[in-house]
Amino acid sequence: MLALKFASPIVAQNGGYFISRGVGRHPRRVIDSYELIYVDKGSLALREQDEDFVLGAGETLLLQPGQLHEGITDYDPALRFYWLHFELAPTTAPESGSFVVRRRTAVTEPERFVALLRLFLGEQEDGAPPETLGLLVLLMLQRLSRHQEKTGIAERGMALAYRARQQIGIRFGDELGASSLAELLRCNADYLGRVFRQAFGVTITEAIHRQRITAAERMLLRNDSSIAVIAQRCGFKDSAYMRRLFIRKVGMTPAVYRKLYCKEHVNFE
């Protein structure tokens, strides 16, 4: 029998998956552990000390222990996010074994990162010890560190990418595309497309489609407007085009989605 003994540099406390119901906001508090947040859908606005963060889908934020943090706005009705609390264990590992994780990171491979988060929650439910769960957290942090190394975007390029995404969130209902967005931001369209993909792992066109589909999901559940009207409000050229994209991204037609979830849609605080 082979006996292995090792110590994880991270000890996980707990984790979960938050589903908003559109009321309240993140509590004002100080915690004695690190908290890693990954936004799965919607947006989350937080303040830590004097710094504000507005996170979109596919972004992480690492909150520090001993720092006051709180919600800036009420929860987005579409918001869903994963959260993990962990501590750093005393270690004698050499400094060369360390790595850098930014406070805020745009995940370039969200499917793989979400798979790790789900594995963490599954292992937690099965009663895995904190040290074992800590290895999964360590793997997530290392992956975030590698994402940052791969992007290598200058601060100016990163700022431009975030401005572009902000405009997509505001103007998705308009006639918007990569060229018009570049014109709005007064920059080269090819450069904008390149830094945007490096920052968020998707093209500008894909980001616009995602924003429009997210808005359509919301409208289908919240009002009785026809699908054609919703398509127009969300920026689609016609309802048939929205229907094709909706099936591709959600797995069903808008009509079926509304029928399934309009009366049974349940969110949790």
Image (cartoon, rainbow, N blue to C red):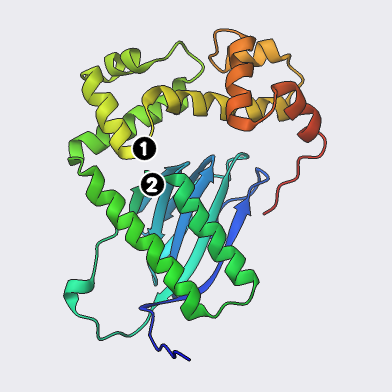
For disc 2, the marked residue is 107
- Percent coordinates x, y for residue 208 in the rendering: 45, 24
**Point 20% across, 18% down: residue:** 188
Q: In front: 6, or 32?
A: 6
Q: The disc labelled 1 sits on which kind of residue?
A: Gly
Label 1 close to label 2 by CB (< 8 Å): yes
For disc 1, the marked residue is 201
Image quarter where the C terminus lies is bottom right
> In this orientation, does residue 129 appear?
yes
**Point 29% across, 84% down: residue:** 91
Classify residue 77 by image quadrant: top right
Q: In front: 152, or 269?
A: 152
Q: In front: 146, or 157?
A: 146
As drawn, is 68 to the left or to the right of 80?
A: left
Mark before the other along the chain sequence, 1 or 2:
2
**Point 64% across, 11% down: residue:** 239
> In this orientation, does residue 30 appear?
no
Against 73, residue 205 (above or below) is above
Task: Label 2, secondary structure: give it.
Answer: loop
Q: In front: 184, or 73?
A: 184
